[in-house]
Image (cartoon, coloured by chain):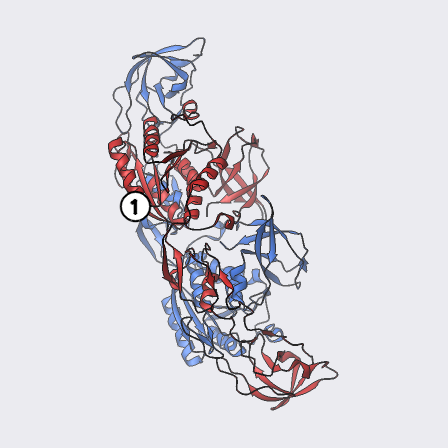
Chain colours: A red, B blue
Amino acid sequence: MTDHKETKDMLGRGGLISVSRAQQLLRENLRAPVASSEEVLLAEALDRVLATDVVAPENLPAAPRSTMDGFAVRAADTYGASESMPCYLSVTGEVLMGKPCEGDVNVGCCHKVPTGGLIPAGADSVVMFEHTVPVDETMIEVVKGVGTGTNLIQSGEDIRKDAKALPAGHRIRPQDLGLLAGLGIDRVKVVAPVRVGILSTGDEIIPHTQVPKPGQIRNINSIALAGAVTRAHGIYTDYGIVSDRKEIFLPAVEKAIAENDIVLFSGGSSVGVRDLGQQVVEEVGPPGILVHGVTLKPGKPVLIGMSGATPVFGLPGHPVSAMVCFDLFVQPTIAALSGLPPEYGLPRPSITARLTRNINSAPGRLDVVRVQLQQTDSKTWKAEPVLGKSGSISTLSRAHGYFLIDEASQGVQENSTIKVFLYI
Amino acid sequence: MTDHKETKDMLGRGGLISVSRAQQLLRENLRAPVASSEEVLLAEALDRVLATDVVAPENLPAAPRSTMDGFAVRAADTYGASESMPCYLSVTGEVLMGKPCEGDVNVGCCHKVPTGGLIPAGADSVVMFEHTVPVDETMIEVVKGVGTGTNLIQSGEDIRKDAKALPAGHRIRPQDLGLLAGLGIDRVKVVAPVRVGILSTGDEIIPHTQVPKPGQIRNINSIALAGAVTRAHGIYTDYGIVSDRKEIFLPAVEKAIAENDIVLFSGGSSVGVRDLGQQVVEEVGPPGILVHGVTLKPGKPVLIGMSGATPVFGLPGHPVSAMVCFDLFVQPTIAALSGLPPEYGLPRPSITARLTRNINSAPGRLDVVRVQLQQTDSKTWKAEPVLGKSGSISTLSRAHGYFLIDEASQGVQENSTIKVFLYI
């Protein structure tokens, strides 16, 4: 890469900025979430983001239920009961699964009840089978007393009517589908999926289905970025390979902006294409270019701008750089436009591993170092750096994950414990 | 739950076993992967598992390319060049992006080359622009010499022809799509998705779209398990709610076994339904029941069996227990039948957090404790246990993740550092 050229912004807006500053600038300029929402059936709602709070329309459970197989009793009747001094109760009924209770539990009486069965009126607790001894068909001994509320779940104990079941901005997980089903909710209002337009440019780029002539290379970035958009729960439109002549490229980017919530372009790694990218992002403004270049390796020449409310990313042509910039800038933008509130963000899960060799880093730069993992024993993982040029897509494909060397650091020593974020 | 009853196996096969022993038994009985494979286009291949190794059909890149904007030179011509003693080269050509090279680079000459451009015959390295000074239109000064191979990527340096690009059993990630595209591969042979049949049973269970009468409850498990199957990259068939009379339930399970690679049933939490589950799993054998009950909370009453090569899981009726058992037993089974080799398994990523209160655990039992996470400062997360009965689906919906208390432990103290696995 042409270090000297890239440290200055040709539009006179200053030089490289840090990744965190670029992320902040981007966040400040986003209008979230995407306006439109839609109603979907629960069966289609997995991984969608709620557009509004969901409030419980009823108590769950609707009525108290036993959490044990046993006998529904009045707790007062069993106070003090023990092996040596049992109490005796008449069995005057039985609760059947899925049926209403028949009759009340009177003083000195009990009803047989299965796990999940309703608690009949009069009863306030359940004695489990194991703490009873049958005397005959109509009477039991209770050998261990219970307090009020023992072995049952109260009405509304799972969730109470009018409580917030799930907040707006929540991504629906399998267990959330369960909660919504339990409340009898079959339709939810969700944010429309974020639409991402993907363009490639560069005279040397051809569709991956074609055979390259000398000097041509197949389009790697479009399909890899499309996969990354899908993983980020966005939907993509692939605009294919667009000529890098400005009179063709600019209208193609404008069309993609009109049709999407986010636009990505990538492709040629030559100076000419980088210059074109800058001109185009500036012209589709205001506000135009927000970020031109970050102190990041790989991924330094990333270009970030806005056309009105639509973020436009000029990703580096090298595939590894493009994917690293996707993770750091595009994925959080998709999340924000999906309606996920920033404060919602959980930390990114990781594993710890031991680095197998020294890795140097230039201070003032964030390094994203790809690693292969190998298990040494049941608890320990070794992380072997996958070295190679940022144009080498195989380095990213061989990697199980990556670790970061931050701006303050000059490198990480062999055998250091590092935090590896996995490419799953 | 009726502790006493569940510690013995009513079929006389011994009592509860540990989770790891149950997982091992299950693994030993699986025949992996599912036999059938299919060919898909690259555009449909994300997250699919390769059925065969993919071998590179050609070198990537096909020919050496420049990694800098500069001049393609013979390194020997530049040896010793410096600011004080530059060497002079004639500019006799220019490489254009996407075009074949025109002419060779002769001794004392160079061709202008962009990043990504081909290296003309004769040249063996690239001097970057920044290390040159133009003399006139046809001559440059080189102020820093280069060694052979500097600033270029060799043919096959990314991946070499006939090398294994991706192994069988690999799940295709976005960057893998990029690698395959770069190699011109547009179709891959992948393992057919694992088919999972889901049944619910229990007299009290009604579809979640209906209004329960007294004693009835809505079906929470089917849709939550369906979501979990989708997340695990399986495809599900929901057989709905089946009567818990054996003459109806057994043929329904047999039909699901015939039509799927894995069968899950869940539903009623009463003794009657548990007994029915055991009978049915035994009758669809051999081998029948492998595991009846594990030392796990929640999730103790899980039932695991095989009908020929088809795993059959009787999941506990309580939704939280059902989902915990899914994570521990069903998800790894889907992975194994998908063709993911066991040794492929990366560790599960986690975050560390501080526990906000003491949690007790019975020794000899694996506890899965759900937690809510809260950020206390930029680096630290607090994990607040979400307490509640295993029938409370809202506890799972409120949770951001879980931690484990293993069989040897009697609990975890407040302020301990714990490893939280996230529900993402």
| Chain designation of label 1 | A
* A58 to A366, vertically: above or below: below
Question: How far across and how far down the image is residue B241, in percent?
Answer: 41, 74
| Quadrant for the N terminus of chain A in the image | top left
Amino acid on which the number 1 mark rests in the picture: Glu
Which residue is at the far top? B85
In the displayed structure, B239 sits above or below B229; it is below
User: Residue A396 appears at what percent x and percent y?
Assistant: 43, 39
Q: Residue at x 47, y 39 (%)?
A: A23
Say whether residue B171 is visible: no
Q: Which of these two is toward me, A43 or B75?
A: A43
Front-most of residues B340 and B273: B273
- Picture quadrant where residue B208 is located: bottom left
Counting every numbered tag in the picture gives 1
Q: Is residue A365 in sight in this rendering?
A: yes
10 Å crowding of disc 1: few (<14), some (14-19), many (20+):
some
Residue lying furthest right in this view? Answer: A84
Residue at image position (46%, 45%) is A423
The relative height of residue A297 versus residue B272 in the rendered view (above or below) is above
Whether residue B64 sits left or right of residue A79 in the image: it is left
Q: Secondary structure at mark 1?
A: helix
Q: Residue B274, percent across and down? A: 52, 75
Q: Is residue A118 above or below residue B375?
A: below
Q: Nearer the viewer, residue B227 or A220?
A: B227
Name the spot of residue B421 as percent of width and height, x first. Answer: 55, 53
Q: Which residue is mark 1?
A: A259
Apparent side of residue A257 relative to residue B394 in the rendered image (left or right):
left
